[in-house]
Image (spheres, rainbow, N blue to C red):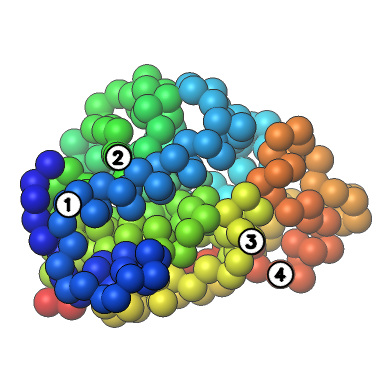
Amino acid sequence: MIDRPLRGSACRWVAHTRGEAVNDDMTSAEMARVGDGLRQQVLRDYEQLEPGETDTWNPVEREGELTYRLSMFYAQAVSLGLSRIPRADLRVLDVGTGNGRSTRSFIDLGLRPEQLTGIDLRPGAIALARRLHPGISFDVYDGERIDAPDGAFNWVQIACVHATIADPEHRLHVARECTRVLEPGGYLFYFDNWVSDWLAGHEVLDPVAIHPELEVVWSSPIRSHQCLPRVRNRMTLIGHDRSFVGKARAFLRPRTRIDRLLHPSHFVMLARRPM
Ligand SMILES: C[S@@+](CC[C@H](N)C(=O)[O-])C[C@H]1O[C@@H](n2cnc3c(N)ncnc32)[C@H](O)[C@@H]1O
């Protein structure tokens, strides 16, 4: 671990978390404590939801997951179209890749596997990602410092990760690391639930506040349920979504179809790091 002092917002929020006076330098030892807290919480939650190398959220079995995938794919395609960087020149980091589906979709959008790297806190998810998507680089991340130099990537994606993090200060820590590894002029693609998961506090997520240092290029609420075919939508308008069962109940708020029609489910933001 490099003993690198940190400055600015990272120090302020760590001090705030501990109820300490603001200290302008944060050593890597302090950062390690933050990373460890973050890792323990996410690993504990996922031990219930998707332990080891399981594929609990396979879109074939979960309608909510299927509509999430389709709407995120749409948002990824629009965002790539808005980018000023030629697709062949993109160097993509997917933070919180899970079992790699959110990274793999870039291949369908014309990128080569060697342009893509996915990282995640969960060793089981990374093992599954490597099996499902050979050719893409996947690594376990310890929640502290992303193992890449400043500005190593020109596209950082963070998809449905902040909703799983319980501590708002931890979210800022992850956001700061995403920005650090993004080169000036590079893009951050954020796609996440409108509110955090129930295990993680169920609060509205605000990507602009999480990334105050970036310039927003495009942002929009998303209703991922609109991907559902109309007939199916009408037939199942009332009643709980049957695609979420068992342990996942602790994770998601039980939403009726009417709920889904009235409220956005997700939020997308494409933002650029100033030159
Ligand atoms: C809901 S899944 C989304 C996975 C993937 N991005 C997708 O869209 O399919 C959230 C993932 O974020 C991971 N995660 C949460 N906090 C993280 C962090 N600080 N760093 C890396 N991964 C994290 C979890 O382990 C989990 O695999």
Say the numbered circle drawn on residue 14: none
* Label 4 SS: loop
x, y (%) of residue 244? 74, 40
Which mark sits nearer the N-terminus, 2 or 4? Answer: 2
- Mark 1 lies on a secondary structure that is helix
| Residue type at tag 2 | Asp
The amino acid on which the numbered mark 3 sits, given as a three-letter code, is His
Which numbered marker is on residue 263? 4
> Mark 4, residues whose alpha carbon is within 10 Å: few (<14), some, or many (≥20)?
few
Q: Is residue 162 left or right of residue 181?
A: right
Residue depicted at x 91% and y 55% = 238
Q: Which residue is mark 3?
A: 202
Q: Earlier in the sequence, mark 3 or mark 4?
A: 3
Mark 3 or 4: the one toward you: 3
Q: CA distance from mark 3 to mark 4?
A: 15 Å
Ranked by sequence position, the earlier of labels 1 and 4 is 1
Q: Tell me the tag on residue 28.
A: 1
Pointers 1 and 2 in contact (CB under 8 A)? no
Q: Residues within 10 Å of mark 1 (few under 14, many from 20)?
A: some
Picture layout, residue 260 above or below residue 60 = below
Kindly report the distance in space between the C-alpha atoms of the residues bearing marks 3 and 1: 30 Å
Any part of residue 254 in sight: yes
Q: Is mark 3 within 8 Å of ligand 1?
A: no
Q: Is residue 251 above or below residue 238?
A: above
Task: Indicate if the residue with disc 2 has its beta carbon within 8 Å of ligand 1.
Answer: no
Which x, y percent locates residue 109?
Answer: 35, 48
